[in-house]
Image (cartoon, rainbow, N blue to C red):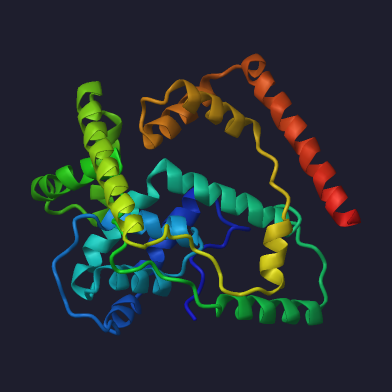
Amino acid sequence: MAAALFSFTSLSVSSLLFALVRRFLLPTYPALMSESEYPQGPLPKDLEATLLSIIRDIGVAVSEKVLRKRVEAHYKIDFVSHHAALLAALRTVLATPEVQLLTAKAKQEKEKEVGGKGKKRGRSPSSDKKDKKKDKKEKRVPKEKKPDDYPKAPLTAFFIFCSEKRDQLRRENPNDSVGDIGKKLGAQWKLVSAEDSARYQKQAEADKARHEREMAAYIAKGGAKFSRQSKSKGKHQKREKSAVKRAMPAYMFFAQDFRAKHGDLSMTEQMRQAGAAWKQLSAAEKEPFEAKAAKDKARHASEVQALQKS
C-alpha cells in the first residue's frame, strides 16, 4: 500500500503542500507509472480540474499510488509520458486557496485527535497494534467509482486562466521548471484585471451551466448523483454518523459573512479576498466573530458531553 502523502502532526501547511509534490519526484515514480494498464494518449486539457475533484472526493491525505490510478482510470490513458505536466498541474492545484484550506483543516483535525501539536497521548503497544489493524481494514474497503458517463466537473475561472496561459509561459520561459511555471501562473492570476477576471468568470459560469444541463440529462435517463460513501457498515461508519459537528473558528464565521456579501465573486476569489480582508481587521473588528466562535465552541462541548452520556 502506498505511503500517505501527509504527516499533519509535524509539518506546516506549506510543508505539507511541498511534501505532496515531492512524493511525485521520487525515483520510484516512473516505475509506478509504468505499471499502468492503459495505452498512452494526449495530455487532457482539464487535468487540473480532475486533480482537484479527486482531492475533494478522497481528501488531502490521498496517496501517490491512488492519485495516479484515479487519474489514469478517469482518462483511460497511461501518464508516464505526461509526468512533468502532471507535476505542473498538481502544483497549480496545491496553490489554490481551497486546497490550502482543506490541508489546514485536516492538519488541525489530526492535531486534535492526538491531543494537540507535539503532545501525543500515552498508549500501550497493544492498543497501537489494534489501531493499526483497524486502520488497515478500513483502508481496504473498496470505494465506489464514478460511472464512465458521469458528467465532467465544471472548471473554475482560475483553471480556465491557467489552461489559457500555461503554454505561452512555457514558450517564453523554456528553462523554467514546472514549479516555476506554476508559481508564475499563481502570481499572474493575482494581477488579472477586473475586466479579464469577469471574462474568466463568465466562462466558468458557462461551464457550470453545461455541467448542470448534462447532470439533468444524466439523472433523467436513470442516473443518480454521485456520492462517495464506503460500503462498510462497521464501527467506523457508525462513529461518523454520530459525530458532533466541529466548532468553527472566528475566521470561518467571517468568511461566511464575506461570501454572503460578495456572491458575485468566484469561490476562489472569495477565499483569496476574505483571507486578505481578515488580516486587515483590527482586534475590535474581530470581536463579533470571536464571540460567535466562542459560542459555537461551547455548543460543541455541550453536544460532545451529551453524546458521551448517551
Query: Residue, x 84% and y 42% (percent of image)?
Result: 302
Query: Residue, x 79% and y 77% (percent of image)?
Result: 127
| Along the viewing direction, whichever of 212 and 196 lies nearer the viewer | 212
Task: Pinpoint residue 20: horizontal percent, then vertical percent.
Answer: 43, 61
Task: Pinpoint residue 235: horizontal percent, then vertical percent.
Answer: 72, 71
Q: Which image quadrant for residue 178?
A: bottom left
- Please identify the residue farthest to the right as the structure is shown: 309
Q: Which image quadrant for residue 308?
A: bottom right
In the rendered view, tell whether residue 50 sits above or below residue 97: below
| Along the viewing direction, whichever of 46 and 193 lies nearer the viewer | 46
Q: Is residue 144 left or right of residue 43?
A: right
Query: Residue, x 81% and y 49% (percent of image)?
Result: 304
Q: Which image quadrant for residue 132?
A: bottom right
| Along the viewing direction, whichever of 225 and 202 lies nearer the viewer | 225
Task: Pinpoint residue 1: horizontal percent, then vertical percent.
Answer: 49, 81
Quarter of the image with the C terminus in it: bottom right
Residue 192 appears in view: no
Total of numbered circles in the picture?
Answer: 0
Q: Is residue 258 left or right of residue 305?
A: left
- Please identify the residue farthest to the left as the structure is shown: 171
In the rendered view, tell whether residue 265 sits above or below residue 43: above
Residue 195 appears in view: yes
Task: Pinpoint residue 245: horizontal percent, then vertical percent.
Answer: 69, 47
Query: Residue, x 19% and y 52% (percent of image)?
Result: 176
Q: Is residue 130 left or right of residue 273?
A: right
In the rendered view, tell whether residue 283 sits above or below residue 141: above
Q: Is residue 88 left or right of residue 274?
A: left
